[in-house]
């Protein structure tokens, strides 16, 4: 048997992976290293190549070019059953003709591990389903099936656990609950998790490291906080949360800050938070970092970006916050989130307001939006 | 199917007007069953109990309750009865062995190529475009004494100079298998066509080699297809009287139940014996099939 029974996670390394399908390239050139024991999320819209990446790691597809290493061992040409990897499939893929317990025991029986049944029951206990061991998968709810699929993979103690949008089919409440459980299980067993999802909240909530994937490439990779606070590309700034973007030519640039001129308004970003410091650049700010002021412009001060005046054209109450959409002539629409802290909103539609935020909350991006100007 | 069946009587009970329509719609089917199934069946049973007319000629019988007819035919034709079921079993297993890979290829591997899939399905069904009798007759020519197949086998010393292919069990079983293979392939295909291939991926992901994935996942999930396929081949083969007959691929040494029934009816004109054999064939098949379905437990799978 090529796979030994390991109890610890292993590194995963993808080197120069390229995957072509007839007619299109799913993955262009992917380099990725996931350290052992990490919860790694691959985040991206559908069709970005994240599921393909997962299938390559599992061995269900083979790359056109490149190498896959698990724990420093080249597994590129290994068959799926020879790899120390298990997958929780998007549709769970539970065997309909077997009981829940037999499903969970399948992998360890194949590997001829001693005492498969007690081990399988143990795994079912971990996901709190031991009372349903004799049921058929079809008799379980979606959330229960998902947990069986997780137990069926975890029982093998794989070096690497692959999760293909496993929470996609669950309702919001169950999903939150499973996110917490999944994270707890990962901490408990210490395996390397590679989680593929299109849900940015899920990725940020659970993962140690998030890689944002777009059109077969990784746009940006890092801790969730870094990715959120300092997105480097337009795609990341919009896929991970919302952003207001402003585009203009650089007017001033020194070692501390870079400023652009947008229709007469000066917008500044700290140099260390800017990807590009010359020519036409895009600067963004998160809606919750911005505030608005009524009646008169706030006194301009160092370290503050002020734009306006504009008109409030939409107000949305979402519970935790109010979301204001402000139309500023020649700049476009700007979104501002104001936390709902009990003060009743006195601002009304049509009010004339100025928007401001701290310079240190700006971020400068490396590319420009496809259609000019409008931030969202 | 089951849903439709359970829904119909409920709505019929609720609305008397509709129940009359349901009855009206069922009527042609009922009449058909009565005329062409119940009547011949009753006639078959009464015939099987007839006694010969004393001093009468050949083929003259009178109504009676001659249960001894059954004992007589069992004693007289035990050899052919056993042969029928042995041939049917072998031919069914052969058909399964040939059909499974074909059905798997068409239903699973060729899924992404609908044109190839359609073409291969047509090839499976194509033999039906020509009459069953003509095809069997063609095989008779191919296996004939001076056919190239016989000559080739004689030249390569597989067949002795004075041996014939026709009339041997091998050729008869070959003919039976050939004639009924599509009845095995099609139900297997419809089953495998629905096979969820992500289950196979899950199997390989869970350390199962392709062979173990086949026996642990694919095969058990295809049992309903195997069951309907084996029933659709085994039942007609057990009663077949064309392939094994002397006019086609068989000889007196390969006579099956169907041939015995045929000769009793049409040549010897021993109608009670022929009827008794027919009734027994039906009963035996019903018993075997019920045991088989009970055993494979297919209702569990769906």
Image (spheres, coloured by chain):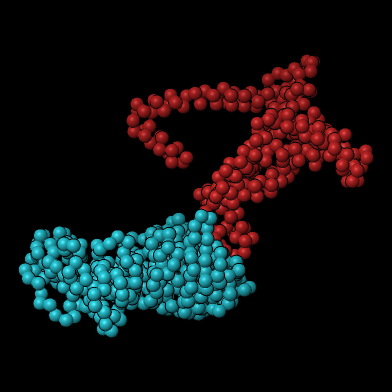
Quadrant assignment, res B279: top right
Placement of the C terminus of chain A among the 4 image quadrants: bottom left
Q: Relative to residue A261, is residue B150 depicted above or below?
A: above
Quadrant assignment, res A266: bottom left
| Residue B85 in view of the camera | no
Q: Which chain is cyan?
A: A
Q: Position of residue B60 (x, y in %)?
A: 75, 17
Q: Which of the pair A175/B28 is nearer the observer?
A: A175
Q: Position of residue A147 (x, y in %)?
A: 43, 66
Q: Relative to residue A85, is residue B174 depicted above or below?
A: above
Q: Position of residue A216 (x, y in %)?
A: 45, 64
Q: Which of the pair B44/A263 is nearer the observer?
A: A263
Q: Position of residue A367 (x, y in %)?
A: 34, 69
The residue located at (52%, 23%) in the rendering is B31
Residue at the extreme right of the image, as rendered: B161
Residue at the extreme left of the image, as rendered: A295
The residue located at (76%, 18%) in the rendering is B59
Placement of the N terminus of chain A among the 4 image quadrants: bottom right
Quadrant assignment, res A274: bottom left
The residue located at (60%, 68%) in the rendering is A77
Instruction: Tell me: A66 left or right of A191.
Output: right
The residue located at (43%, 56%) in the rendering is A139
Q: Relative to residue A138, is residue A245 depicted above or below?
A: below
Instruction: Tell me: A60 left or right of A49.
Output: right
């Amino acid at each position: 048997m090529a796979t030994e029974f390991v109890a610890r996670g292993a590194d995963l390394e993808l080197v120069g992976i390229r995957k072509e399908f007839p007619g299109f390239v799913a993955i262009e050139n992917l380099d990725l290293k996931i350290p052992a024991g990490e919860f790694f999320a691959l985040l991206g819209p559908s069709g970005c190549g994240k599921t393909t990446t997962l299938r390559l790691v599992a061995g269900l597809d083979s790359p056109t070019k490149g190498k896959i290493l698990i724990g420093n061992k080249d597994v590129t040409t290994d068959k799926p059953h020879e790899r120390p990897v298990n997958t929780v499939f998007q549709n769970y893929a539970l065997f309909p003709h077997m009981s829940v317990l037999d499903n969970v025991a399948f992998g360890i029986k194949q590997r001829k591990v001693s005492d498969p049944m007690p081990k399988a029951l143990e795994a079912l206990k971990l996901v709190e389903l031991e009372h349903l061991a004799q049921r058929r998968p079809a008799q379980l709810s979606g959330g229960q099936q998902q947990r069986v699929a997780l137990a069926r993979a975890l029982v093998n103690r794989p070096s690497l656990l692959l999760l293909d949008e496993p929470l996609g089919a669950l309702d919001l409440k169950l999903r939150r609950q499973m996110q917490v459980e999944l994270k707890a299980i990962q901490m408990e067993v210490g395996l390397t998790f590679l989680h593929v999802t299109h849900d940015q909240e899920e990725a940020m909530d659970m993962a140690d490291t998030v890689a944002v994937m777009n059109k077969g490439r990784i746009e940006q990779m890092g801790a969730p906080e870094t990715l959120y606070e300092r997105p480097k590309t337009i795609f990341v700034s919009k896929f991970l949360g919302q952003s207001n973007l402003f585009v203009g030519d650089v007017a001033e640039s020194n070692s501390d800050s870079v400023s652009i001129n947008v229709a007469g308004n000066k917008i500044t970003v700290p140099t260390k938070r800017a990807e590009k410091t010359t020519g036409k650049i895009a600067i963004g700010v998160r809606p919750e970092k911005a505030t608005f002021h009524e009646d008169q412009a706030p006194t301009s001060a160092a370290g503050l970006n002020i734009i306006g005046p504009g008109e409030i054209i939409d107000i949305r109450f979402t519970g935790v916050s109010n979301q204001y959409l402000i139309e500023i002539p020649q700049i476009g629409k700007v979104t501002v989130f104001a936390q709902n802290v009990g003060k009743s909103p006195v601002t009304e539609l049509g009010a004339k307001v100025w928007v401001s935020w701290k310079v240190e909350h700006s971020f400068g991006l490396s590319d420009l939006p496809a259609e000019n100007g409008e931030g969202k | 199917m089951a849903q439709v069946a359970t829904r119909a009587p409920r709505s019929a009970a609720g609305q008397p007007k509709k129940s009359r329509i349901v009855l009206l719609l069922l009527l042609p089917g009922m009449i058909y069953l009565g005329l062409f199934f119940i009547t011949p069946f009753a006639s078959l049973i009464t015939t099987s109990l007839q006694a010969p007319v004393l001093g009468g000629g050949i083929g003259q019988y009178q109504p009676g309750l001659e249960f001894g007819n059954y004992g007589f035919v069992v004693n007289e034709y035990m050899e052919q009865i056993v042969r029928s079921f042995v041939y049917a079993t072998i031919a069914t297993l052969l058909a399964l062995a040939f059909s499974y890979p074909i059905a798997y290829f068409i239903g699973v591997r060729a899924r992404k190529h609908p044109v190839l899939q359609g073409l291969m399905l047509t090839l499976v069904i194509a033999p039906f475009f020509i009459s069953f009798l003509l095809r069997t007759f063609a095989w008779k020519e191919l296996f004939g004494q001076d056919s190239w197949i016989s000559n080739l086998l004689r030249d390569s010393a597989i067949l002795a100079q004075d041996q014939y292919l026709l009339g041997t069990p091998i050729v008869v079983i070959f003919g039976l298998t050939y004639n009924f293979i599509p009845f095995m392939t099609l139900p297997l295909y419809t089953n495998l066509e629905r096979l969820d291939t992500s289950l196979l991926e899950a199997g390989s992901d869970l350390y199962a080699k392709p062979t173990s994935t086949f026996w642990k996942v694919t095969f058990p999930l295809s049992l309903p297809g195997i069951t309907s396929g084996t029933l659709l081949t085994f039942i007609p083969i057990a009663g077949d009287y064309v392939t094994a007959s002397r006019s086609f691929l068989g000889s007196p040494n390969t006579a099956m139940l169907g041939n015995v029934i045929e000769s009793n009816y049409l040549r010897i004109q021993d109608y009670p014996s022929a009827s008794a054999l027919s009734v027994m064939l039906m009963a035996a098949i019903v018993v075997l099939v019920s045991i088989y379905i009970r055993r494979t437990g297919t209702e569990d799978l769906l």
